[in-house]
Image: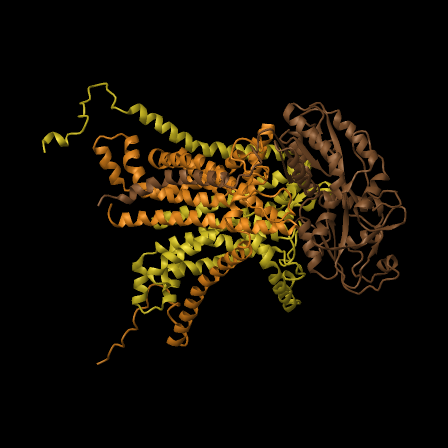
Chain colours: A brown, B yellow, C orange
Amino acid sequence: MRSRSRHVSWLLVPVLAVGTVALATGVATAGVSAKGTKLAGATLNGSGSTFQQAYQQEATARFVKKNSGITINYSGGGSGKGRTDFTNQVVDFAGTDGLFKPTDPAPKGGPYDYIPFVAAPITVSYNLSSVKNLQLSADTIAKIFSRQIKTWNDPAVKADNPKASLPSTAITVAHRSDSSGTTQNFTQYLTTAAPTSWTLGSGSTVPWPADTQAGNGNAGVANIIKSTDGAVGYVDFSDARAAALTFASVKNAAGKIVAPSVAATTAALQGVKLAADGTYNPLNSPNAKAYPIASPTWMLVYQTQTDPAKGAALKAYLTFILTDGQKFASSVDYAPLPPAFVKATQARVNAIKA
Amino acid sequence: MAVTDTIPEQAPRPLVGGDRPPGALADRVFRALALGAGLLVLVILGLIIYEMTNQSLPWFRAEGFNAIFSDNWVPSAGHYGALGLVVGTLVVGAIALLIAVPVSVGIALFVTEVAHRRVRRPIVYTIDLLAAIPSVVFGLWALRALETPLANVYSSVSDALSGVPILGALTANPNPSGASYMTAGIVVAIMITPIITAITREVYATCPPAQKEAALALGATRWEMIRGSVFPHSRSGVTAAVIIGFGRAVGETIAVALVIGSSPRLTEQIFGPGDTMASVIVNSFGEATGTERAALIGLGVVLLAVTVVIGVLARTVLAGRQRRLGVA
Amino acid sequence: MTTVAPRAPATPARPDSIYRSRDGHRSRKARNTVATSLISASFVLALVPLVGVVVFIVQKGSGVFGWHFLTTDIPFSDRDFGGGMKPAVVGTLLITGAATVMAVPLGVLGAIYLNEYGKQGPLARLIRFLAEIMTGVPSIVMGLFIYLLWVLPRKQNGLSGFAGALALGCLMLPIVIRTSEEILRVVPEELREGSYALGSRKVRTIRTVVLPHAAPGIVSGALLAVARAAGETAPLLFVIGIVTSTNTSIFNGPNTTLSQQIFRGATSPFVAAQERAYGAALTLVLLVFIFTALARIVTSLYARRSSAGG
C-alpha cells in the first residue's frame, strides 16, 4: 500500500489555499448591495481622536449615502497617532483633541489647517442613588479627583449642594487607563479653573492617586461608575448617555451652575475667540450659559491637496460637516459650532487647493 | 515484459575528467535560496533592533540611567522612569508561573504517567485547544466574566489576611473592580499552560522506562516512582520549560492591557492595579508624541532585551541537559 | 561456636528516604492517593477556563451569529444595531493568507538550509539561535516595528492589509522555521543516503525524498502557525487602519480583521458594537478551531502512515 496519505497531505496545501481564497471571495461577494463599486471614486482615510469617532461615523454614514462613489475610513487610534499619521501623510485627514507642540516635527505635506467642526461636553458622572442633581464647583471636583475629599458628605460637597442630603458613602474615583484626549482636556480644565486645588498637572495621562480605579476607554470608566455605589468619573457626553449615567452640574467661570448639554457647549464656544489658524479654547469659558468642561476637537487637513479626486472629496466632506453636519450633531450628542465659527471655518475650507 | 522496461529514462553518462555532475547549477541556486531564507531571520531581527533603538534614543538621552531604574512614570510632567513597569511585567510573569507551572506539571504527569494510554491523545489535543484561543478573546472573557467574581475573592482574602506579616501587605488594598496584577497573572497563566505542558510532557516522555520500572519493581507507589525516577531526570528540562513559559508571559499584551488596571507605580499589592511594559505601550501609543513616544518604543526595546536574555537562559539550560544526558 | 551476627542488608546506594516512611505502608498509600488525585485534578483545572471561555463566547455571540452576520458589512456607526462582520472575516482570511504565503515557503526554505546544508556550522547555529529569539519577540514589538519602518515612510499607501501581513509574517516565520526543522530532522538519514547512492543531487533528494516525507508534519506546523496568526491583535492595531465595507485588495487601502473588531468592541460603550464584537469573537474562535483540527487530521494521517511503514 503506497502512502496515499502522503499525497493527500500534499494536496491539502493547494486545496487549503484555493479554499481560503474561494471562501474569502465567496463571503466578499455574497450580500453585495446595490451601493455600487466600493473603492472607486475616492477613498479618504483618517485616524486620530477617539473623542470625535462617534460623530465621524454618523457623518460618514450620511455623507456616503449622498455620494456613493466615496468611502471614508476613520480608524481612531488616538490623537497622538493621528498627528503622527498626518505628519507622515499616511492619512488624508486626522482627528485631534490637542494641538501640535513646537517640538513636534513639521508635517510633511506643507501648511495645514485646524478645522473645528463640533465640540462636546465632558461629563462628571456619578453613582449616588439618593442624589439626583449633584452640583459641583471646580475646586470641589479637583479635590475629589485628587483624593483630598474622600466621602460624599464632606463639607466642600455640602457647600456646593446646600439643599441636598448627602450620604456618608466613600467616593470611588474612576479615570482612564489608556492615554486619552479626554483626560487631557479634563485635567487642563482643572488646572485652569482650580489651580490651587489641582496639583497633578495635565496631560493624556496623569499620576492619579493609588486608591483610584482605571477603566479602558470611556466604556471602561462608565462601567466602573455604573457598578460602584459612590463612584464618580469623567466620561465623554455621548458615551455617558449611551451608558445612561447621571451627570453633575458644574459651576462655570461666570458663577452659574450649568448641566452638561449640547446647547451649553455651544454657548461655551460662543464665549471664546476663534483664532485665525482655527484653534480655540472653550475650557472654563466666561459665557454665562456655558458648560465649563467643553472639549474642543479638530480635523487636520493640508492646505494643498495633491490628489484631485481626494481633494475634492475632502472639501465636499468638510463642507457637508459644516452644513448638514451641524444640524444632526446634537442628535448624536455633539455640540454644533456657533454660526460665527462656521462662517470663518467654511471660508478656510473653500481656500483649500484641491 | 522486456528488460528495457526497467531501464531509467536517461542512462547515466560516465563522467570524464573535468566534468561537473549534472544539476550542479540547480543545486547551487537552491542552496543560495535556502541560505537567503535563513539569513532573512538575521536581517529582520537586525532591522528591528536597529530601528527601535534608533527611535528610542531621545528617551535614553533624556533619562539616562533613570530610564529603567527609577520609578517615575509621569508623562504629563515629562518623567519617563520605567522601573514600576519593568517590575510590574516581572510580577505578572511570576504570578503566572506560580499558577501555571504546578498545573502544567500535573497535566504532563497525568498524560505520561497516570492516564490510560488511549486517553492521552485526546487530552493533549484538548490542552492545545487552550493555546488556540486568541489572546483578545481571553481578554474579553476575563474583562467581562472574570473580573467581578475575582474582585469578591480578593476582598475576602484581603480581609482574612489583613495583619498577617508578609501576606497581609501583599494582599492589601484590593481593587474593587478586580483589575489587578493577580487577575492579569491568572489570565496569562491560562495562556502559557499549553506551552509549558507540551515541553514538560516531552521531557517526561524521554525518561528511561527502565528506571521507572525498577522503582516500581522495588515496591514504590506511583507517586514515589515519579518523585524518584521522573523528577530527578527532568529537572533541567522542566526548568527550560519554565523559562520559556516566563518568556511568553512577559510578552502577553492585549489580555493584560484589558485587565491590569493601569497604575504605573512600583507596588507590592498584587490585588491592586498595576501596569506592564507591553500594556502601557498598547494603552498609550495612540496619544503619545515626542519623548513619550520614544519612551514607549524604548519599552519595546527593553521587552526585546528581556526576551533575548530569557532565550539565552533557556538555551543554556537545555544545552546543559543535552550534554549531561546525551538526549537530543 | 560463635555465630556471626547476620549483617544488616546493605542499604541501597541511592538515599532512599523517599521509600522509607515513619508510619509504614498506610501513609505511603495515602500520599500516593493524594498526589494522584492532585495530578488528575490539574487536568480538570485546566479545563475550567477552556470551557468557561467557549461557553461564554458561544452564549454571547450566538445571538448575532449566522450567515447574515458573516455576509453583511459593518455599520458605519457603533451605535447602530444589526450589520455583520463580513469585512473583518474577509480581512482576517486575506491578511492571514498573505502572511502564510510569505512566511511558510520562506520558513521551510530556511529550515531546509538549517537541516540539510548548514547543519551545525557557525552560521546555521547563529540563525537557529536568532530564530528561537524571534519566536519570543512580543507581538506588539513587531507591530511597532512595521509601523515605524513600513507604514510611516509609505505615506498614503502605508496603512494596508499588506502591512498587517508583513507583521504577521514576521511573527510566523521563526515558528515555521523551528517546527519545520524539527520535522526535517526526523526524516531518516537512510532515505537521503539511499537517494544519493542512486545518483541524485541534493536538490533532487530534497525535492523527491525529504520533502514528501516531511510534508504532513510541515503542513501541520504551518496550520498551527496560521491559527496563531489569525488571532493576533496587537501587531495589527497600528498598521491596518480600518474599514466598514469589504476591501478585497490587500495592497490598496486599509483593512480590518476580526481580532481588531473584538478589541474595539471590548472597549466600546455602545451595546450594538459590543454585540458584534461577541459575534466576531465566536467567528474567530470557530476559525481557529477549524485550522487546529485540520492540523490534527494531517498529523494523524502522518502518524498512521509512519506506523504503517510507508
Query: x, y (%) of residue B147?
Result: 61, 58
**Is B215 placed left or right of B16 in the picture?**
right
Say whether residue B247 is visible: no
Q: Looking at the figure, which quarter contains the N terminus of chain C? A: bottom left
- In the figure, residue A4 lies in which quadrant? top left
Query: x, y (%) of residue A91?
Result: 63, 31
Q: Nearer the viewer, residue B166 or B10?
A: B10
Q: Looking at the figure, which quarter contains the C terminus of chain C? A: top left
- Residue sitting at x 44%, y 55%: B127
**Is A202 placed left or right of C24 in the picture?**
right
Query: x, y (%) of residue A72?
Result: 63, 35
C129 relative to B7, above or below:
below
Disc count in the image?
A: 0
Q: Nearer the viewer, residue B157 or C206?
A: C206
Q: Which residue occupies the extreme bottom position in the image? A: C1
Q: Which residue occupies the extreme left position in the image? A: B2
- Residue sitting at x 45%, y 51%: B195
- Residue sitting at x 34%, y 33%: C117
- Residue sitting at x 78%, y 59%: A150
Say whether residue A257 is visible: yes
Q: Nearer the viewer, residue A170 or B273?
A: A170
Q: Which residue occupies the extreme front position in the image? A: A34
**Is C14 placed left or right of B166 in the picture?**
left
Query: x, y (%) of residue A260?
Result: 80, 49
Q: Nearer the viewer, residue B295 or B33?
A: B33
B10 relative to A13, above or below:
above
